[in-house]
Image (tube, helix red, strand yellow):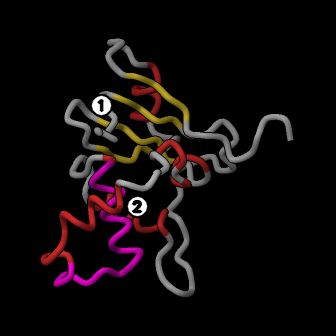
Amino acid sequence: MDWNYYNTFITVAPDCPVQFGTMPPAKKDGMSKHGIEYDLVAEHPYEYTQEELLFQVHIRHKAIPADELKLCDAELRQAFFNKPKACLRASMLSKKFGWGIHFNAEGKLALVPMESPEYNRLLENGDGTLQIVSAMRNKSKNR
């Protein structure tokens, strides 16, 4: 099963509480999942697919040692992807911290701050080749 997006732009959630892309704060006891997501993608734009990013966040958040990864990477991946996962439309980066997520034709992703000209350019989808989807809302409309 392919979990990746291609030629897609995930826009900031309609009820996002910020007006510009904001770095997620660190937690006292280490990095949050969305902090790890941010660091990986901000430092390496268009390097990860959604699948690769989700797995990298998992191994860093769970602090899986490198020697264990060498021995059973395929088994860890299979176990990880056998369980249901939220896609990046549910990421706090787009829901709470003001980052759009652009996936290129290869499925590689980059963060785009909501206040940037690039965000507006992608949102306009001038050539019509980009699928535009919104991040999930933080709260139900009926609340």
Circle 2: element type:
helix
In the displayed structure, would residue 52 be above or below residue 57?
above
Q: Main secondary structure of the magenta part?
A: helix
Q: Quadrant of residue 124?
A: top left
Residue at 34% x, 35% y: name it: 5
Residue at 52% x, 76% y: name it: 26
Circle 1: element type:
loop
Residue pointed to by mark 2: 37
In what quadrant of the picture does the N terminus appear? top left
Image side of residue 73 versus residue 54, left or right: left
Q: Front-most of 1 and 52?
A: 1
Residue type highlighted by circle 2: Glu
Residue 33 place in picture, x, y as percent: 47, 67
In the displayed structure, would residue 17 be above or below residue 118?
below
Write down the region rendered in magenta. 51-68
Residue 82 within the segment the image draws in magenta: no
Residue 6 place in picture, x, y as percent: 29, 31
Q: Can you name the residue that lies furthest to the right here?
A: 143
Q: Is residue 82 visible?
A: yes
Residue pointed to by mark 1: 6
Q: Quadrant of residue 128?
A: top left
First in residue order: circle 1 vs circle 2: 1
Residue type highlighted by circle 1: Tyr
Residue 54 within the segment the image draws in magenta: yes
Q: Can you name the residue that lies furthest to the bottom here?
A: 29
Residue at 69% x, 47% y: name it: 138
